[in-house]
Amino acid sequence: MANRLASETSPYLLQHKDNPVDWYPWGDDALDRARQLDRPLLVSIGYSACHWCHVMEHESFEDPAVAALMNERFVPIKVDREERPDIDAVCMEACQGLTGQGGWPLNVFLTPELRPFFAGTYFPPAQRQGMPSWPMVLEAVAEAWKNRRQDIEHQGEQVARALESSARMAPREDSLPQSAVQDAVEALRQSFDARNAGWGGAPKFPQASIIDFLLGAGEREMSLGTLRAMAGGGIYDQVGGGFARYAVDATWTVPHFEKMLYDNALLARAYLHGWQVSGEERLRRVCCETLDWALREMGGPEGGFCSSLDADSEGVEGKYYVWTIEELRQALGEELAGPAIDFFGATERGNFEHASNVLEGRGAEPERLPEIRCKLFGARDERVRPGLDDKRLTAWNALMIAALADAGAALEHPGYISAARDCARFILDRLRDPDGRLLRTWKDGRAKLGAYLEDHAFLLEGLLVLYEATFEAEWYSAAVELAETLLAKFADPERGGFFTTASDHPHLLVRRQDLEDSPLPSGNSAAALGLLRLSRLSGEQRYEQAAGGILKRSGPVALRYPSAFGHLLQALAFERGPVREIALVGDAADGAGPMARAVRTHFRPRAVLAGGRPVPAGESASVPLLDGRTTVDGRAAAYVCEHFVCQVPVTDARELVALLDGSV
């Protein structure tokens, strides 16, 4: 018999609908029951692509005896961290404060007043390697709740005070040095892995925001070196394209095989920008292969994109992706197997479990590599595929809009532009409540949950990129609407920056601000960059001032810990400028096309671009940067401006490039 999760839309929650645990989704029903029965809440948080979440479910949550203990002593709640980042963030901070570590699955016990008092991550079904079993944890917490209630209440109060203190962090008054951008570059150099590329040791995560910051700052060794290393490692799917979430080692060889939409959207842009500054064909190819993977395997018929692919298939992590030598020979035949095995670095012993190989791409590329990949793709397609989390999240889809639009414009790929448009229309049309407010998640025709800061901020950035790629004013207008919602519903007027939740959104204990860019850009960082860019297109100083509040609050800590603030550093670099506002007037037949191409094909992170036909005298342009701009002698013209003060217009693409490259 299914439990209360059966009517949910989250694939992660639906995975648990047949558990004997009497799971509740987060909501008033569960909270009221905890108060009525005077029982602790057991909040178990994960996501559908999480390997150890599956393990704990099979070991413990499917066990009737364990489930009975959970049902008798607690009110169990299942939370999809991707749907409810607000609950996850508070519980994760509590877990880290209580234990010094965190991760998923995340299991947190709260009083009926929502104060966390005990937390942990994965617990095995039986005691091992110094870890208590999950039944032992349940019994111990239940015993403490019955016999040491005062201690638990005290612990919960302490955790609550710590969470409140963290949420009320005051802005720093330190002024940022003029050398802030270069200081951050040098600080990143100190933690750079010069041997394997990337930052830190194992496990190693792709840091797309840091790479983009470094490319924009003119750094090449760390940024391009990391792009090359990841493209040649097992973290990149050498057969089908797309990146796994992270590598379990320091060499980018063996991934944790789940594929997340957000990683791939961010990395596709980083590879595009790497190609723009280096001209390296492999970087362009990885960008396209990553976007093509997303369109092929994650795209939905309505225009949105699914959230993730599981690490497991047939209950085994990585089974879909790895190859033995014999499997390679069977798929390729003897003629192609030899060069393929050399290129992929495969061996009889293997680099993964059971003599299987995670394929890398560090050798010399064989002449028939496209044919090799095609044959392997066909053979792999016969295997049981990993599970798909097919909910559409506004924030992650917004990242895909930016990636597709950016690549479509730079590579002159109309298919990418079309996909970006379709995704934007899907969000703006289908992810709305009856009052027109943005929603967080959509699945099977149902949209629900109020959108968070990151949903609004990522979409603001994505729509601006789409506008710059198409010059279609509807995307600019939608971006302005989002910016106004940010200021009205999310802004913190006392300390600057933005709250994670809207002013009328129910919150757990505290109303937080998310600040760090790991692994996703934070909502505040995305809001800062989006508002700064919008201010240069609109001339609206309120947007620049709001972004300045974010930089004032987070800038000093970003300079101390730059690896956790890659996206914020991009906003800081933009704010420091110089920024060029480029206005193109005239249609493609008059030459605006070549001039737009001259702007778009280069990586210009400190420039904004507007375009359109001349506006008749007495009328206002749809984008204020275009106001008063006219053609020159009937020819398309480009105006290069700074704070809306423009230089003499030019009418030739080569002149425009010379002007931009000489001044930026």
Image (tube, rainbow, N blue to C red):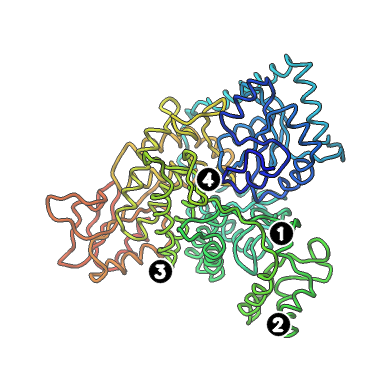
Give the Cα distance between marks 1 and 2: 27 Å
Pointer 3 residue:
412
- Evaluate if marks 4 and 2 touch, with contact meaning CB atoms under 8 Å apart: no
Mark 3 Cα-neighbour bin, 10 Å: few <14, some 14–19, many ≥20? some
Image position of 78 with respect to 426: above or below: above
Image position of 626 with respect to 503: above or below: below
Give the Cα distance between marks 2 and 3: 34 Å
Pointer 1 residue:
313
Going by the numbered disc 4, the residue's amino acid type is: Pro
Give the Cα distance between marks 1 and 3: 37 Å
- Residue 152, x across and y down, in percent: 72, 19
- Residue 502, x across and y down, in percent: 45, 33
Q: Residue at x 32, y 61 (%)?
A: 659
Going by the numbered disc 3, the residue's amino acid type is: Glu
Pointer 4 residue:
521
**Which structural element holds mark 2?**
helix
Give the Cα distance between marks 1 and 4: 29 Å
- Quarter of the figure with residue 26: top right
Q: Residue 534 has which mark?
A: none
**Image quadrant containing the C terminus:** bottom left
Q: Earlier in the sequence, mark 2 or mark 3?
A: 2
Q: Nearer the viewer, mark 1 or mark 4?
A: 1
Whether residue 212 sits left or right of residue 474 in the image: it is right
- Quarter of the figure with residue 139: top right
Going by the numbered disc 2, the residue's amino acid type is: Leu
Q: Earlier in the sequence, mark 1 or mark 4?
A: 1
Image position of 58 with respect to 582: above or below: above
Q: Earlier in the sequence, mark 1 or mark 2?
A: 1
Q: Residue 336 has which mark?
A: 2
